[in-house]
Amino acid sequence: MDKTYQKIIKETVLELLQKLGFEASVEVIEEQGTSNIFFCMARVEKDQNFLIGQYGTNLAAVQHLVRVMLRKKIEERVNIVVDVNDYFLEKKVILEKEAEKVAFEVLENNISVALRPMLPYERKIVHSFLAKNPDISTESIGKGEERKVMISPKSKESE
């Protein structure tokens, strides 16, 4: 295959967005120092709210469709993040601030706190962000749409 992964990803995302009725420009970047992790930034001028959906659910579905489409075009497994107008980037910043605030409360009051129900990608962001804090533990609790992250202080006994 003479096309690069980035070109295949860009063409696939553009094709899907056009079929969904969106005019977009797309840029694909491979994450440095890793293999086969790509960030796909799409810019749309109109109707971004329809493409993103409430809490990013439509965008998460688009990302899933892109992954399925790419499995047929690229033999190696690639990890791709599709973002529209920096929605995921801004969401990540907001989620990290929320997690940091709750982690402070957890440590200050020595209590466990459950965050609001979140989509899988949101929970992953919170877990990854708080994994850097050695005094905090996180776990996902609940089922389906009610699944959320529980943030707890690490018990001194387990050390």
Image (spheres, rainbow, N blue to C red):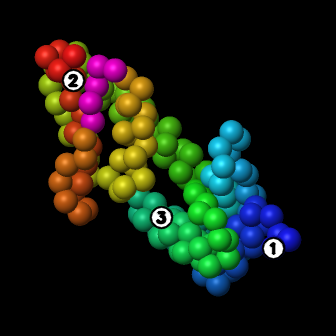
Q: Amino acid at mark 2?
A: Pro
Badge 3 element: helix
Query: Who's the residue at 65% across and 54% down the image?
Result: 36
Quarter of the image containing the C terminus? top left
Inspect this view and state whether residue 150 appears.
yes
Per the model, the C-alpha gap separating discs 3 and 1 is: 28 Å
Q: What is the crowding at mark 1: few (fewer than 14 residues within 10 Å), some, or many (at least 20)?
A: few
Give the numbered dot on residue 68: none
The residue most toward the bottom is 19
Question: Which residue is label 1 attached to?
Answer: 1
Name the residue rendered at 41%, 58% in the picture: 55
In the image, taking residue 31 as reference, residue 126 lies left or right, namely left
Query: Image quadrant for the N terminus?
Result: bottom right
Where is residue 72? Give x, y as percent.
62, 79
Q: Is residue 114 or residue 34 the one in the foreground?
A: 34
Element assignment for label 2: strand
Q: Earlier in the sequence, mark 3 or mark 1?
A: 1
Residue sitting farthest toward the right: 2
Closer to the N terminus: mark 2 or mark 3?
Answer: 3
Label 2 – label 3 distance at C-alpha: 31 Å
Asked whether residue 21 is in view, the answer is no
State yes or no: residue 7 in magenta. no
Q: Which mark is residue 153?
A: 2
Placement of 101 over or under 28, stated as above or below? above
Label 2: few (<14), some or many (≥20) within 10 Å?
many
159 sits to left or right of 96: left
Q: Does the magenta run of residues contain 136?
A: yes
When asked about the image quadrant of residue 95, the answer is top left
In the picture of the structure, the residue carrying the numbered disc 3 is 60
Image height check: is 57 above or below 65? Answer: above
117 lies above or below 144: above
